[in-house]
Image: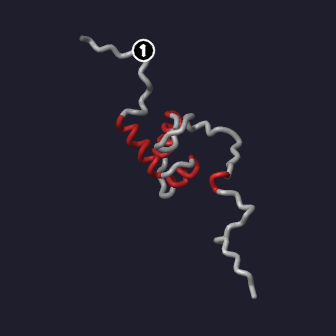
Amino acid sequence: MSENNNNSGTRSDAVPTTELQIERIGPDPHVVAGVSIYGTRYTRAFKLQVLKDADACAEPGDIGRMLRRHGVTHTTLTSFRRQRASGALSPARTGGPLRLNA
């Protein structure tokens, strides 16, 4: 007679998912430091580089290869394009703080 061990298929030596550690070689230079509830934050320079590369794509499949090379998705590219169209990726204003004339 076989013994039925009802442990839901878990192993006692298995590491819980919450304790897994991912070892990185170093910080990603394209990601702005800090944690955001909205996801990854990319630098302005990285966004402009991705947009420049996307604009240079002419053949079918070029954009997909470029996105995989940069490690971003098509929705991220769409977001970068919207930011560029709204002027959010324009060079930062130089000079002092804004003053309102009363």
Mark 1 secondary-structure assignment: loop
Name the image quarter holding the N terminus: bottom right
Residue drawn at the location 62% of the way across and 39% of the way down: 28
| Residue 94 drawn above or below residue 79 | above
Q: Residues within 10 Å of mark 1 (few under 14, many from 20)?
A: few
User: Which residue: 52% across, 34% down?
Assistant: 45
| Viewer-nearest residue: 65 or 56 | 65
Who is closer to the viewer here, 58 or 43? Answer: 43
Residues 54 and 15: in front is: 15
- According to the picture, the residue beneath numbered tag 1 turns out to be 95
Splitting the image into 4 quarters, where does residue 10 fall?
bottom right
Comparing 81 with 97, the one in front is: 97
Could you say where residue 93 lies in the image, as x and y percent from the top left?
A: 41, 21
Q: Residue at x 42, y 14 (%)?
A: 95
Q: Residue 16: where, in percent of width, then height?
A: 66, 57
Which image quadrant for residue 34? top right
In the displayed structure, 89 sits above or below 22; it is above
Judge from the rendering whether residue 96 lies leftward or rightward of residue 17; answer left or right: left
Q: Residue furthest top?
A: 102
| Residue 55 appears left or right of 16 | left
